[in-house]
Structures are given as structure tokens and as C-alpha cells.
Image (cartoon, rainbow, N blue to C red):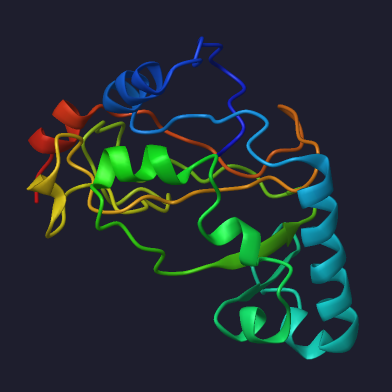
């Protein structure tokens, strides 16, 4: 799951992770995949990029270069990502949050170069509940199915970092919000 530059929490036991998720809407699972697994995935991605360069063209976002490939096409061309689909480091936690019927609905791989763009301006005069900022909100809980579990979460996004990251090089930012906060946001 994503790099966490601001918080250092003890997350040893599954219950600790569930409590942390309920309070913050995310959880970090450190050392989720082994160095050998990471090397195998990266080798498979590199081989696919060499064999199918047209599928890995950089995207048009200003300020930084991102290239990637979405499944299912990628998974048809390589088995290198198969081990991540139901990885034992995250599946028990995902099922504890979403329920036993949880299933994978998508998979993609993305590589990003350092971002040189300035952060976007606040278009909403600082309104903390405004949902139209220039941010991407991944299944915020304010959609159909959110009320089906105690965490007000209809879906999860699991992010595996396949390279070392720190506060200067990570490419995802998480805005913590509790299950109670999500329940109170406008639909």
C-alpha cells in the first residue's frame, strides 16, 4: 500500500491495521512483497515493455512523464503479475474490510518520473468538504455499496511499490479520512 511520509504507527496485528484503516481510510503494509517477488514483477514488466513498446507510451499529463499498462491485456501477455492478484500480505486485510466476497476488479502498472509541475491552486476557497478539487478520489465511500461494511468502503485500491521510495520520490498522496467522516460527506 502507499508510502506514508507523515505517520509512523505500530501496525503489527491485523486488528491494529483495521482500527487504523477505520480512523484514516488507508493502511500501510510494510514489506508486503519480497525482494524476489519484486524482481520477478519488474523483470516481467521490462520484458513486456521491450516486446510491446506501443502499449507503454508516456501519457500526456503536464509536468511529469508517466507510462503504464492496464490489465487484462498486460496479464494476457505475461504471468509476472499473477502473484500480486491475491497476494497473501493483503488479501486477509482486504476481506476483513470488504467482506469475504471481495474480488479483484482491475490491475495496472505505472512508472512515473519525478513531477516538475507546481501543485494545483485551491479552486474552492479552502472548503474542506468540497469534492471538486483537482484531486482524484478513489471510491470515497459516497457511492453505491459503501454502507455494506463497517468501514463505509465499497472498494479498495492496493498499491505495491516496486522500487524504493521516500518523501521526495513517492508519487501518491493520501488524504486521511475516517469511516465516520465519509458517512457525513454529501452524496
Depth check, front residue: 131 or 145 = 145
Residue 74 vs 94, above or below: the answer is below
Query: Where is residue 138 shown, x and y percent of the image?
Result: 37, 53
Residue at 53% x, 15% y is 7
Left/right of residue 181 with respect to residue 98 in the rendered view: left
Q: Quadrant of residue 130?
A: top left
State whether residue 183 is above or below residue 19.
below
Of residues 147 and 131, which is closer to you in this image? 147
Identified at 30% across, 57% down, the residue is 102
Left or right of 21 in this view: 5: right
Does residue 34 appear in this view? yes
Q: Position of residue 51 (x, y in %)?
A: 87, 87
Residue 136 placed where, x, y %?
A: 42, 53
Residue at image point 44% right, 46% down:
91
Whether residue 100 sits left or right of residue 39 in the image: it is left
| Image quadrant in which the N terminus is located | top right
Amino acid at each position: 500500500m502507499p508510502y506514508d511520509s507523515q505517520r509512523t504507527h505500530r501496525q503489527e496485528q491485523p486488528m491494529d491495521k483495521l482500527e487504523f484503516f477505520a480512523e484514516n481510510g488507508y493502511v500501510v503494509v510494510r514489506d508486503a512483497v519480497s525482494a524476489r517477488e519484486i524482481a520477478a514483477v519488474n523483470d516481467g514488466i521490462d520484458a513486456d515493455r521491450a516486446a510491446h513498446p506501443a502499449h507503454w507510451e508516456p501519457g500526456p499529463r503536464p509536468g511529469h512523464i508517466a507510462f503504464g499498462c492496464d490489465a487484462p491485456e498486460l496479464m494476457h501477455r505475461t504471468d509476472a503479475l499473477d502473484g500480486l492478484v491475491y497476494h497473501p500480505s493483503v488479501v486477509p486485510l482486504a476481506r476483513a474490510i470488504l467482506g469475504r466476497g471481495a474480488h479483484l476488479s482491475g490491475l495496472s502498472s505505472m512508472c512515473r518520473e519525478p513531477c516538475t509541475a507546481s501543485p494545483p491552486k485551491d479552486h474552492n476557497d479552502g472548503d474542506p468538504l468540497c469534492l471538486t478539487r483537482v484531486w482524484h478520489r478513489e471510491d470515497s465511500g459516497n457511492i453505491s455499496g459503501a454502507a455494506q461494511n463497517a468501514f463505509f468502503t465499497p472498494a479498495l485500491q492496493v498499491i505495491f511499490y516496486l522500487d524504493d521510495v521516500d518523501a521526495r520520490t513517492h508519487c501518491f498522496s493520501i488524504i486521511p479520512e475516517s469511516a465516520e467522516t465519509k458517512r457525513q460527506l454529501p452524496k
